[in-house]
Structures are given as structure tokens and as C-alpha cells.
Amino acid sequence: MKRLVLVGSVCALSALAAPKPFAGAWKIVGDVSGTPVSQTCTFAVKDAVLTGACVGDEGRSLDLTGELHETSVTWKVTAEWDGSPIVVTFSGTLDTDSTMAGKIDVQPFGVEGTFKGTKAPPAS
């Protein structure tokens, strides 16, 4: 009986420690110095490492890399602005399993903005 209780306790603790279901498509909207941000980012998660791609309204796909730690998420994409390479970093907090919000940092220009994300419902 003690063994059964121990096994049940370990399973319950494992369920509590399981990561939130972050992987999948997220709609990201925001603003950087008056420039609107609108894209869909699709994330894959392995351990704490994020990979995937973001696709903007113009249809261009950009690879992403990042990290997920409990409720903290950060990812980067490399793009081009007026012929110059830029790195756009998104740093946010998961508010729920399906919403997040945070800041956008664009380098080398040193401009910042904010974003909100909503997880897309699974395809049926």
C-alpha cells in the first residue's frame, strides 16, 4: 500500500511540474516606434529550446530561435530593414496557456516596442 501511495504521489508531482502547452502557432501583434507588428509564429519546443518560424502579413517566413522557462519566453528573428540586417528580439511572459505579452527590441537601431500574443486554436 505504501508503494502505491508513493507511485501516486510521484505521478501527481510530475503532472504539476509538466510544462504548459506552448508549442504551436501564435498570433503576435504589436508596435515598434509607430510601426505595426503582425505575424504568426509557429514554435517547436524541445527541453527549453524554441525553434520555428514567424510569417508576417506580407508572407515572408523568418526562422526563429529562443528559450522557454516556465512563464518566461524569449525568441529572436533576423530580418532586413532598408537593406540592413536587423535582429528582432521578443521577450515576454506567458499570462495563461493561450496569451502572452512583452517587449520587442530591434538592433542595431536600438528601438523598442511591445507585443501581445494569442495562441491559435488547434487545427481540426
Image (cartoon, rainbow, N blue to C red):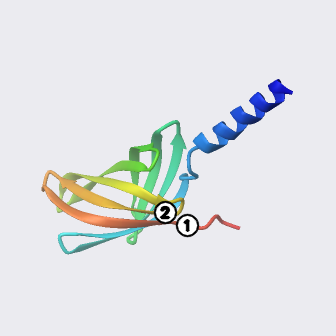
Could you tell me residue 54's position as x and y percent? 42, 58
Residue 62 is tagged as: none
The kind of residue tagged 1 is Ala
Residue toward you, 74 or 18: 18
Q: Are marks 1 and 2 in contact (CB under 8 Å)?
A: yes
Residue at 53 percent of width and 53 percent of height: 22
Residue 26 is tagged as: 2
Looking at the rendered structure, the secondary structure element under dot 1 is: loop
Residue at 47 percent of width and 38 percent of height: 48
Residue at 75 percent of width and 28 percent of height: 6
Looking at the rendered structure, the secondary structure element under dot 2 is: strand
Q: Extreme right residue here?
A: 1
Is the residue 36 above or below the residue 9 in the image?
below
Is the residue 123 above or below the residue 70 in the image?
below
Query: Disc 1 designates what residue?
Result: 120
Could you tell me residue 41's position as x and y percent? 45, 59
Q: Quadrant of residue 114?
A: bottom left
Could you tell me residue 101's position as x and y percent? 37, 63
